[in-house]
Image (cartoon, grey):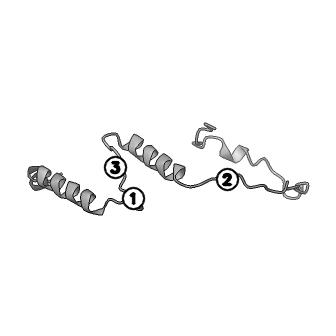
Amino acid sequence: MDTESYRLWYDYSRARDLMFKATNSKHAPWYVIRSDDKRRARLNCIAHILNSIPYGRVKHDKVKLPKRSNKGRYNDQAGLRGMKLVAERY
């Protein structure tokens, strides 16, 4: 943060509040995300956006896969040894 913006902090905050007051409406509301903790702020933002989307289950036909060909077969898991994998949390 530059020193000039730090000096004008309250002026910026007043301008923000005036903008919110002038532009906040029922059909286009502002949402504020507390962002002292950036990781939590991002997760809260993503969760908020996903919760605002209507969701309904979609029925899918069961897919039947053909048998895998043995042509060119090799151990594809061996190439992953020593790699950093994302943890499976779900």
Looking at the rendered structure, the secondary structure element under dot 3 is loop
Q: Residue at x 12, y 50 (%)?
A: 10
Residue topped by disc 2 = 56
Q: Residues within 10 Å of mark 1 (few under 14, many from 20)?
A: few
Dot 3 crowding, Cα within 10 Å, few <14, some 14–19, many 20+: few
CA separation in Å, label 3 and label 1? 15 Å
Residue 40 appears left or right of 83: left
Q: Residue at x 90, y 57 (%)?
A: 66
The residue pinned by badge 3 equals: 32
**Residue type, mark 2 in image:** Gly
Instruction: Judge from the rendering whether residue 80 lies leftward or rightward of residue 4; answer left or right.
Output: right
User: Could you say whether the residue bearing mark 2 is in a helix, strand or loop?
Assistant: loop
User: Label 1, label 2: how many angstroms apart (C-alpha)?
Assistant: 25 Å
Question: Which percent across, then down, holds residue 41?
Answer: 39, 44
Where residue 85 appears, as percent x and y from the top left, is 60, 42
User: Real-space Cα distance between discs 2 and 3?
Assistant: 27 Å
Tell which tag, 1 or 2, sits nearer the viewer: 1
Q: Mark 1 — residue?
A: 26
Q: Quadrant of residue 81?
A: top right
Picture disc at residue 54? none
The three-letter amino acid code for the residue at tag 1 is Lys
The extreme front residue here reads 26
